[in-house]
């Protein structure tokens, strides 16, 4: 539908911004996935989340960060 095309258009700058930071991102409809790995994955995911929240604020969207699901294989990050 038209709404999904509009969503994809609005998320393209977000995808390109994360690509510029060397952070992998994917979208499907209104779901977003950010993938980081390596020694600096903690710093990268933090930068990606701040960038994501700022991008959505800039386009007038309201996000609920408390509903974001974050997963990690590193125990200290999960806590």
Image (cartoon, grey):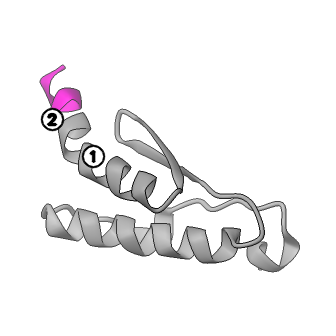
Q: Please state which of residues 69 and 42 is positioned toward the viewer in this rendering.
A: 42
For residue 11, which numbered disc appears in the image? 1
SS class, disc 2 = helix
* Residue visible at 41% across and 75% down in the picture: 50
Residue beneath the point at 19% across and 19% down: 1
Vertical side of 69 occupied by 27: above or below: above
Q: In the image, is 1 to the left or to the right of 63?
A: left
Mark linked to residue 6: 2
Decide whether residue 58 is among the magenta residues. Answer: no
The image shows residue 57 at horizontal and vertical percentages of: 21, 70
User: Residue 34 location, x and y as percent?
Assistant: 54, 53
| Quadrant including the C terminus | bottom right
- Secondary structure found at label 1: helix
The residue segment tinted magenta is 1-6
Q: Quadrant of residue 37?
A: bottom right
Please tell me which residue is depicted at 63% across the width and 62% down the height of the picture: 70
Q: Nearer the viewer, mark 1 or mark 2?
A: 1
Horizontal and vertical percent position of residue 8: 25, 35
Label 2: few (<14), some (14–19) or many (≥20) C-alpha neighbours in 10 Å: few
Q: Nearer the viewer, residue 4 or 13?
A: 13
Determine the CA span between mark 1 and mark 2.
Answer: 9 Å
15 in relation to 9, above or below: below
Specify whether 25 is left or right of 8.
right
Q: Which mark is residue 37?
A: none
Sequence-first tag of 1 and 2: 2
């Amino acid at each position: 539908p038209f709404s999904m095309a509009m969503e994809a258009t609005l998320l393209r700058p977000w995808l390109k911004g994360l690509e510029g930071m060397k952070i992998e991102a994917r979208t499907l409809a209104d779901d977003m996935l950010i993938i980081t790995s390596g020694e600096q994955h903690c710093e990268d995911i933090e930068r990606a989340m701040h960038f994501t929240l700022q991008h959505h604020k800039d386009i007038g969207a309201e996000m609920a960060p408390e509903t974001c699901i974050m997963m990690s294989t590193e125990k200290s990050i999960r806590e």
